Image: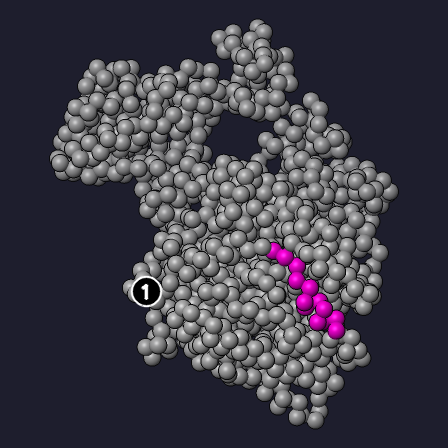
């Protein structure tokens, strides 16, 4: 049977996930639960249903169609009891105004590649390519391996955007074929990491070292989230760790936290874990940049 | 001063502060109506009854240039004014006047493109009406227009463009020639020709008229010489005093012959442009390949040590700013087709020379910098590029585009040149193309007619009609029946039958549109017999014929075709829902469309319609259908000839263009709900762009869809307009990516592209609070306009355009 994967979105003319003009494929499912995740639709497993309140015209079509009386029409729009509603996925067809949206498409490797190659001229001229992100793309390793293999045979530059929590032996064949690894370093302290992502970082750091040792090109991405992973000593340790990774690290991006994903949580009927967190303090950013420069790391910010 | 692009000033010869003052004054310019020209032209025509029209028009021009108010704009190095005050629109009663009188009291209260008008002006204009009654171009057109055309207009399928009520414009003079011989030289050519005893009466009249027009132009210049001298004597600022003295000195023999300096060349280009716009109220008088013909003058002055790059920039920027002092007033009905006071004075830089080598030079960069400093709607700056275009020029262009006022628009040589070659041009000639007006393409100095915008054909309306067996549901008018029976019932059995109906109806209305073009052209032959403009175009002086009577070297025209994407998307929706998947009957669909998708059932059907893939998302099936819509029109063109056929010009044929200014908005008013899910009255698609908001797959998918259209046969011009969010171009890296995005067009068969860089929030705020966004300029269609001057519907159409963001 053909290898198939679950994709939440293909972002074309993606400019933030590697060099040149790229297409970023978001694969569904992640083994981390970062409190600040901006792509919850790709974080939680399986297909999902989003409800876009702004499109709801309160016509009542879904109320009628939902089983177990799971949807109530209130003054605020539709209130959905997601546990009770067993036919939620059918409502996208019912709602005349597209307030319900099914997220997640099962796609075959060849079909996905065919779609990605449509932008080949853009990749070629801009020295861009394809980036796999998510979620954690490496969780769908069989599918990913197949897709990357075909893309590489076509001469396309491939980047893998990963959080690094996987079995090295299982994932390395994919990374080995790929041209660039976009690696998140979220925290050094195991406890902070646990608090932020719901999981320990031992394997992640080990995998990072292994990738670097193999000489694979890495772009490290550090997101700083106030009250979560903005402890300066820990950030300095992260930078020290990156420094240790050596020449494999081609570039480091410091990213400010943003709350743009919050609407997606609401649409998914999931509570947004963070609330009322502002932007990262400018002073802290300066301190980070200063420390990085002191230890000889060049960081891109903004 | 505005931050420069790549230009780094190394001396203070370019006074940026003064540019700022001029620019600010122009930004706050007040549109008004000036009665002077109307009065003078009326008096002149009264004096010349019985003479040949070309002579009468030349005498009128001469008289205007002698008598009109002239002024020198404060601070400006460039002189020459079109009307009595800055940004006033003159009236051209000889073309059409009835509407002027009818709308006198409405000019100042229009929802877009308003004009201030004093009671005195009204009182000066009203008495002129009686003289012009029955004599105007518009009346002749109306008189000769067949009844069936009027019916087609009532249905909303055809729209008589500007050519039915005003001059034609659309002239790119042969500036090399004008600068070489001057107005005086042109008069001398005509004088010499007149000595030939074998001339026809038409030729004699033309040469006589040309001499009169050129002498008028020279007198106009001399008047400025005198005025500059007077002003210099009163001027207290030493620098300005000297400038005025220099200006006065230049005027002593400016354009008696060859332009003698860079300054004279730029001033002459401006004057030539301006004089054509006093002679006729056409628009889209364009500058052509400015960097190519100005460069020799620049280079000579640089080498002689009398000019610096900085001074050149100052002169160019003043010239750019001054092109915004000109104006044109149109009837309200036509204004909706072209909102934002557009003059479409296209100015083109870059691209290959006739020999195929790259033509980019210092002037190309300086023009981008002049636009960066002036940031006003005119001139309509365009950049040509090819594989040999320096990255630096594209980078300056991208940096300018990033600032979000819509300029420059970009033309891809690798696509446009093959498109021009479909007109059987020599390769060297095709390589010399320039944009004229919006995105229509022409060969400078060789074209004598508009390359687009003859009669407008509303493709969306034709589609609505075929669903109704040719009957317009709104007016009940039925001019053709698909089934051969009367009434609305068409009941197509298959997609093929529907397609055949489209082809049949398209042919029917295209034939009518060509008839309309002919009626307008025949009237223009008389009413737009313009000796001044004609003399600047190759072959006209040689043949002794005006442009409108066959004076130009080539003659290709196109109509304006509005809504191919709406039609393609709609055809595909019907094909899929009614015929392939059979989830809907045609009858049901029609009921729902009649009800504008209202009610629960309507909403459900609309959902189905909207879910069908749309053009602009790189979907082969629908893209192919949109391409078929283009092919169906292209297939008709070999049947049509222009009025000048057999009278001298090569070609005299039709080509295709989707350059349709803001007509996609008012054309949408006339079209009921369509099967692509578009609601009744909403805009059609703009140019070749996807339907508003239909492109969901990002900009690369749009380009891929566009690439499947027959762009390399669209010799009349193909328009694509995209909107990016500001963030998508922020920073060096994103800029670099954007430049590469532009470059890919070369491999993707993209004729033209232009960009708005504005987020929805800014645009919505600008609509609500125009006073806070006085200088917000947007790309409307093939031109730029200040957002606040557009009517609300056109503003909405820009807001609804998909914003590509990341």
The residue positioned 56% from the left and 84% from the top of the image is B184
Quarter of the picture containing the C terminus of chain A is top left
Residue nearest the viewer, comparing B711 with B285: B285
Mark 1 lies on residue: B12
**Secondary element at tag 1:** loop
B585 lies left or right of A258 = right
A158, above or below A137, in the image: below
- Above or below, A172 against B401 in this view is above
Nearer-the-camera pick, B402 or B721: B402
Depth check: give the residue in front, B618 or B645.
B645
Report the residue at 81% width, 68% height from top: B131
Please indicate, yes or no, whether residue B544 appears anywhere in the rendered image.
no
Residue pictured at 13% horizontal, 31% vertical: A244
The image shows residue B147 at horizontal and vertical percentages of 84, 56
Over which residues does the magenta segment extend?
B31-43
Q: Quadrant of residue B192?
A: bottom right
Q: Which residue is rendered at x = 41% and y = 25% of the image?
A: A261
- Asked whether residue B196 is in view, the answer is yes
In this image, B169 relative to B201: left or right? left
């Amino acid at each position: 049977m053909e290898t198939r994967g679950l994709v939440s979105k293909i972002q074309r003319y993606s400019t933030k996930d590697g060099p040149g003009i790229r297409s970023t494929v978001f694969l569904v499912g992640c083994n981390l639960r970062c409190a600040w995740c901006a792509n919850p639709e790709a974080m939680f497993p399986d297909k999902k249903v989003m409800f876009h309140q702004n499109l709801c015209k309160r016509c009542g079509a879904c109320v009628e169609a939902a089983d177990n009386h799971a949807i109530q029409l209130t003054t605020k729009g539709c209130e959905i009891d997601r546990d009770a509603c067993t036919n939620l996925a059918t409502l996208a067809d019912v709602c005349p105004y597209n307030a319900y949206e099914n997220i997640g498409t099962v796609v075959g490797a060849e079909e996905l590649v065919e779609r990605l190659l449509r932008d080949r001229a853009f990749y070629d001229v801009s020295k861009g390519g394809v980036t796999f992100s998510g979620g954690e793309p490496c969780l769908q390793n069989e599918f990913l391996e197949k897709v990357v293999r075909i893309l590489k045979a076509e001469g396309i530059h491939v980047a893998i955007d990963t959080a690094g929590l996987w079995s090295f032996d299982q994932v390395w064949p994919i990374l080995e074929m790929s041209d660039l690894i976009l690696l998140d370093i979220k925290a050094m302290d195991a406890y902070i990491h646990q608090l932020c992502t719901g999981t320990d970082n031992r394997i992640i750091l080990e995998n990072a070292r292994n990738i670097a040792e193999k000489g694979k090109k890495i772009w490290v991405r550090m997101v700083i989230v106030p009250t979560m992973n903005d402890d300066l000593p820990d950030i300095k340790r992260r930078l020290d760790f990156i420094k240790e990774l050596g020449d494999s690290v081609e570039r480091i991006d410091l990213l400010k936290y943003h709350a743009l994903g919050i609407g997606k949580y609401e649409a998914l009927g999931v509570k947004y874990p963070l609330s009322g967190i502002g932007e990262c303090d400018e002073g802290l950013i300066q301190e980070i940049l200063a420390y990085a420069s002191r230890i000889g790391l060049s960081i891109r910010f903004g | 001063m505005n931050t420069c692009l790549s230009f780094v000033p190394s001396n203070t010869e370019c006074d940026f502060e003064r540019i700022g003052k001029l620019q600010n004054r122009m930004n706050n310019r007040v549109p008004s109506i000036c009665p002077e020209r109307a009065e003078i032209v009326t008096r002149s025509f009264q004096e010349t009854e019985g003479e040949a029209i070309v002579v009468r028009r030349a005498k009128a021009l001469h008289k205007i240039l002698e008598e009109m108010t002239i002024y020198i704009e404060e601070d400006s190095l460039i002189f020459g004014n079109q009307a009595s005050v800055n940004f006033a629109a003159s009236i051209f009663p000889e073309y059409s006047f009835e509407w002027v009188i009818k709308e006198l009291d409405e000019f100042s209260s229009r929802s877009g493109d308003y004009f201030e008008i004093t009671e005195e002006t009204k009182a000066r204009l009203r008495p002129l009406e009686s003289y012009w009654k029955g004599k105007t171009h518009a009346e002749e057109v109306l008189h000769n227009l067949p009844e069936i055309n009027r019916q087609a207009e009532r249905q909303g399928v055809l729209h008589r463009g500007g050519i039915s009520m005003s001059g034609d414009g659309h002239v790119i003079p042969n500036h090399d020639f004008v600068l070489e011989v001057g107005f005086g030289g042109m008069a001398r050519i005509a004088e010499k020709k007149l000595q030939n005893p074998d001339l026809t009466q038409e030729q004699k009249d033309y040469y006589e008229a040309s001499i009169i027009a050129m002498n008028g132009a020279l007198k106009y210049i001399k008047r400025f010489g005198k005025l500059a001298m007077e002003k210099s004597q009163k001027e207290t600022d030493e620098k300005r005093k000297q400038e005025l003295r220099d200006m006065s000195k230049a005027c002593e023999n400016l354009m008696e012959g060859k332009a003698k300096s860079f300054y004279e060349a730029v001033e002459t280009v401006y004057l030539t442009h301006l004089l054509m716009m006093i002679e006729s109220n056409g628009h889209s008088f364009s500058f052509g390949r400015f960097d190519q013909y100005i460069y020799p003058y620049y280079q000579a002055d640089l080498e002689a040590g009398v000019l610096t790059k900085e001074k050149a920039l100052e002169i160019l920027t003043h010239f750019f700013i001054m092109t915004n002092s000109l104006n044109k007033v149109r009837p309200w009905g036509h204004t909706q087709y072209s909102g934002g006071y557009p003059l479409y004075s296209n100015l083109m830089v870059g691209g290959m020379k006739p020999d195929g080598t790259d033509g980019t030079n210092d002037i190309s960069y300086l023009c981008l910098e002049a636009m960066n400093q002036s940031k006003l709607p005119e001139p309509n700056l365009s950049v040509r590029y090819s594989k040999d275009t320096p990255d630096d020029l594209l980078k300056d262009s991208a940096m300018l585009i990033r600032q979000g006022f819509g300029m420059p628009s970009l033309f891809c040589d690798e696509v446009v040149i093959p498109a021009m070659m479909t007109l059987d041009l020599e390769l060297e000639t095709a390589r010399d193309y320039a944009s004229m007006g919006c995105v229509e393409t022409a060969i400078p100095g060789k074209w004598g007619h508009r390359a687009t915008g003859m009669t407008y054909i509303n493709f969306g309306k034709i589609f609505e009609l075929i669903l109704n067996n040719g009957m317009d549901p709104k007016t009940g008018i039925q001019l053709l029946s698909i089934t051969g029976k009367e009434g609305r019932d068409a009941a197509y059995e298959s997609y093929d039958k529907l397609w055949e109906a489209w082809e049949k109806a398209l042919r029917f209305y295209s034939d009518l549109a060509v008839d309309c073009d002919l009626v307008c052209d025949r009237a223009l032959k008389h009413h737009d017999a313009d000796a001044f403009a004609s003399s600047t175009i190759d072959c006209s002086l040689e043949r002794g014929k005006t442009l409108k009577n066959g004076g130009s070297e080539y003659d290709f025209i196109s109509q304006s075709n509005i809504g191919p994407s709406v039609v393609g998307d709609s055809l595909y929706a019907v094909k899929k829902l009614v015929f392939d998947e059979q989830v809907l009957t045609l009858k049901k669909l029609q009921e729902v469309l009649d009800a504008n998708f209202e009610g629960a059932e309507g909403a459900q059907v609309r959902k189905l319609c909207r879910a069908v893939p749309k053009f602009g998302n790189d979907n082969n099936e629908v893209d192919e259908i949109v391409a078929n819509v283009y092919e169906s029109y292209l297939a008709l063109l070999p049947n049509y000839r222009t009025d000048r056929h057999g009278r001298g010009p090569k070609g005299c044929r039709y080509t295709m263009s989707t350059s349709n200014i803001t007509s996609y908005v008012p054309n949408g008013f006339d079209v009921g709900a369509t099967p692509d899910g578009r609601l009744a009255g909403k805009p059609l698609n703009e140019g070749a762009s996807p339907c508003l908001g239909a492109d969901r797959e990002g900009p690369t998918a749009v380009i891929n869809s566009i690439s499947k259209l027959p762009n390399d046969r669209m010799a009349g011009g193909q328009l694509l307009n995209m909107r990016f969010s500001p963030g998508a171009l922020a920073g060096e890296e994103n800029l670099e990516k954007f430049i590469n995005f532009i470059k890919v067009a070369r491999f993707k068969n993209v004729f033209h592209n232009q960009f708005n860089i504005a987020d929805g929030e800014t645009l919505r705020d600008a609509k609500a609070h125009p006073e806070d966004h006085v200088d917000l300029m947007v790309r409307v269609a093939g031109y730029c306009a200040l957002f606040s001057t557009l009517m609300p519907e056109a503003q909405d159409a820009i807001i609804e355009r998909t914003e590509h963001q990341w």
